[in-house]
Amino acid sequence: MCTFVVLTERLRPVGGTVQTDIDPRSLIGRKAFDRNGHKIGTIDEVYLDDATGVPEWAAVRTGLFSRDAFVPLEPSDLADDGLHVPYERALIKDAPDFGVGRHLSPEQELQLYHHYGLALPPPPSSDRDFGRLAGQED
């Protein structure tokens, strides 16, 4: 459901769930803080929703020799000092570890939604019929 995106200078700004005018590139390298203002780490990567292209998750490096923890961008707030994630540091560090730099499967994303107690997003609506075989007439 989410695609890892290598953010380069050629990537145009994309509307996001944190703010409508956020450029995903601006998140890379920013600090992330938990609900109490404690530093979690630094944002390494941003994951875009496959259907909408909207930034949905950030991978936060939690320490020099630690792994990246996925945090949701939807309930988070972006401020001048960094990304403020409305969860306790312990919950964030206990998030499922899927590695980084590759596509998140729908099952992995579902695990993240459950971990953070988030409501599942509605399935993408489609007005196209994908059930018909090519060359088949109505």
Image (tube, rainbow, N blue to C red):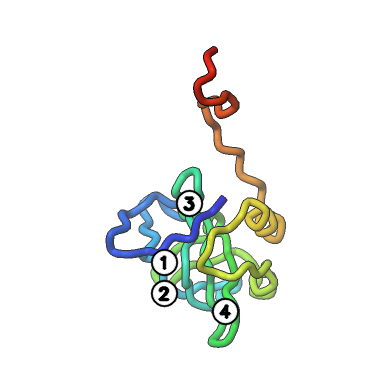
Disc 1 marks which residue? 27
> Could you tell me residue 69's position as x and y percent?
60, 71
The front one of 35 and 25 is: 25
Q: Quadrant of residue 38?
A: bottom right
Q: Which residue is found at the position 66% from the left and 59% from the top? A: 112
The front one of 127 and 70 is: 127
Looking at the rendered image, the quarter that the C terminus falls into is top right
Numbered badge on residue 62: 4
Disc 2 marks which residue? 29
Q: Secondary structure at mark 4?
A: loop
Residue lying at the far left of the rendered structure? 10
The amino acid pointed to by label 1 is Leu
Label 2 and label 3: CA atoms lie apart by: 19 Å
Dot 2 surroundings within 10 Å: few (below 14), some, or many (20 or more)?
some
The amino acid pointed to by label 2 is Gly
Label 4 and label 3: CA atoms lie apart by: 23 Å
Question: Is residue 71 placed above or below 128 in the rendered structure?
Answer: below
> Could you tell me residue 96's position as x and y percent?
68, 67
Label 1 and label 4: CA atoms lie apart by: 15 Å
> Could you tell me residue 107's position as x and y percent?
67, 53
82 horizontally vs 33: left or right: left
> Could you tell me residue 44's position as x and y percent?
47, 72
Give the mark nearer the N terminus: 4 vs 3.
3
The amino acid pointed to by label 3 is Thr
The amino acid pointed to by label 4 is Thr
Numbered badge on residue 17: 3
Q: Secondary structure at mark 2?
A: loop
Q: Which residue is found at the position 71% from the left and 56% from the top? A: 114
Label 2 and label 4: CA atoms lie apart by: 12 Å
